[in-house]
Image (tube, grey):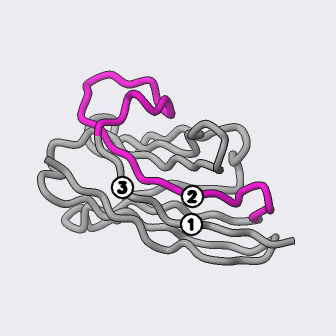
Amino acid sequence: QVQLVESGGGPVQAGGSLRLACVASGNPAKLNYMAWFRQVPGKEREGVAHIYTRIARGDTEYADSVQGRFTISQDSDSAKNTVYLQMNSLMPEDTAMYYCAAGDNWHVLALQPEQYKYWGRGTQVTVSS
């Protein structure tokens, strides 16, 4: 089993930056990919950024809405089992609960929620104008 814990959310003004972190524990060696999703009440969960952590390690994919503003990365120390989401040029529409997700499939359709087996509890990001 794998547990995911997010941190780094909070309030920020438009144009500002935040860095979210997700730490995997339990059996993180089995993971092949991790991602960040976000959700606003009443809306579907949206895939934001995806990274391959084992096979094709370091390859990433992004939602169009965050391309060029958000960057997903792994800690260079693999023993930390940590993935980050650097969010720059934040806008009020980025306000959401942000969730870390992970999976161990060999093949995956990135940023599709059903492809991720493990989920964290989320961290709130609030961007004010």
- Mark sitting earlier along the chain (3/2): 2
Task: Inspect the image, locate mark 2, and give the three-letter code of the amino acid beneath it.
Answer: Met
Q: Which residues are magenta?
A: 90-117
Where residue 112 appears, x then y in whole percent? Answer: 49, 29
Where residue 36 appears, x then y in whole percent? Answer: 49, 49
User: Residue shown at 57%/49% (left/top)?
Assistant: 38
User: Residue shown at 68%/69% (left/top)?
Assistant: 126
Label 1 sits on residue: 124
Label 3 sits on residue: 120
Question: Label 3, label 2: how many angstroms apart (C-alpha)?
Answer: 11 Å
Look at the picture and state if 89 lies above or below 57: below
Q: 5 left or right of 66?
A: left
Residue at disc 2, secondary structure: strand
Question: Label 2, label 1: how many angstroms apart (C-alpha)?
Answer: 4 Å
Look at the picture and state if 67 lies above or below 25: above
- Mark sitting earlier along the chain (2/1): 2
Q: 41 left or right of 101?
A: right
Judging depth in this view, the residue of 7 and 124 nearest the camera is 124
Residue at disc 1, secondary structure: strand
The crowd level at tag 3 (other Cα within 10 Å; few <14, some 14-19, many 20+) is some
Where residue 58 appears, x then y in whole percent? Answer: 40, 46
The crowd level at tag 2 (other Cα within 10 Å; few <14, some 14-19, many 20+) is some
Label 2 sits on residue: 97
Q: Are marks 3 and 1 in contact (CB under 8 Å)?
A: no
User: Residue shown at 50%/74% (left/top)?
Assistant: 8
Residue at disc 3, secondary structure: loop
